[in-house]
């Protein structure tokens, strides 16, 4: 299963739209908040599921956390702002252990990061729409095979 992971689009869907057009054989999109409205717009243009959580700038009824199980691997989606992720991942790690997940997807900082802590993969795809001090907008690409093995990478969107 191939999953695109977006976060922090902040109303700018130019890069997300480009990625959706260019990346083939996608099965699902995860949007990690800021802005949920963007996830709802994406939902209207793709033929596959879009799962999302709300971030610190979002209002409405979207969940702040969501767990998906795919081929036996449990993934936790959250924006991250409630867990102090700009300082460290301790609180998020504790949540991951409590929820029994193999992968944690989070955003908020706009800084892409991929690391393994205590056997749990933590992936922040960076920002798909507001790069701030980063050289490029970024997104995550996850592939989960039939046995539940997870491959995850951060992809750059190069400016022309």
Image (spheres, rainbow, N blue to C red):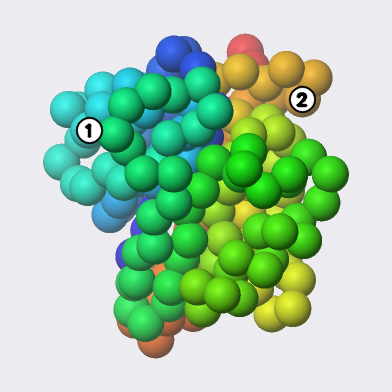
Residue 45 seen in render:
yes
The residue positioned 39% from the left and 23% from the top of the image is 59
Residue 42 seen in render:
no
Nearer-the-camera pick, 142 or 79:
79
Judging by the rendered image, the residue that carries numbered circle 2 is 134
In the rendered picture of this protein, how many numbered marks are placed on residues?
2
Place residue 89 in its image quadrant. Answer: bottom right
As measured in the structure, the alpha-carbon distance from the residue carrying label 2 to the one carrying label 1 is 27 Å
Q: Position of residue 98 (x, y in %)?
A: 56, 75
**Mark 2 or mark 1, earlier in chain:** 1
Picture layout, residue 131 above or below residue 69: above
Q: Position of residue 131 (x, y in %)?
A: 67, 21
On-image quarter of the C terminus: top right
Judging by the rendered image, the residue that carries numbered circle 1 is 43
Label 1 residue SS = helix
Label 2 residue SS = loop
In the image: residue 102, left or right of residue 37 = right
Does the residue at mark 2 contact the one at mark 1 (Cβ under 8 Å)?
Answer: no
Q: Which mark is residue 86?
A: none
Place residue 136 in its image quadrant. Answer: top right
The residue positioned 34% from the left and 72% from the top of the image is 70
């Amino acid at each position: 299963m191939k999953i695109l992971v977006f976060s922090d689009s902040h109303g700018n869907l130019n890069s997300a739209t480009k990625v959706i057009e260019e990346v083939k054989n996608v099965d699902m999109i995860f949007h990690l908040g800021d802005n949920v409205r963007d996830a709802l717009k994406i939902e209207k243009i793709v033929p596959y599921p879009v799962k999302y959580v709300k971030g610190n700038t979002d209002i409405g009824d979207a969940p702040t956390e969501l767990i998906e199980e795919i081929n036996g691997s449990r993934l936790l989606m959250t924006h991250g702002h409630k867990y102090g992720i700009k300082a460290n991942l301790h609180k998020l790690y504790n949540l991951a252990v409590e929820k029994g997940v193999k992968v944690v997807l989070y955003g908020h900082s706009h800084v892409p990061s991929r690391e393994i802590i205590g056997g749990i993969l933590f992936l922040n795809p960076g920002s798909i729409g507001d790069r701030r001090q980063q050289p490029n907008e970024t997104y995550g690409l996850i592939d989960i095979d039939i046995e539940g093995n997870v491959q995850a990478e951060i992809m750059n969107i190069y400016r022309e």
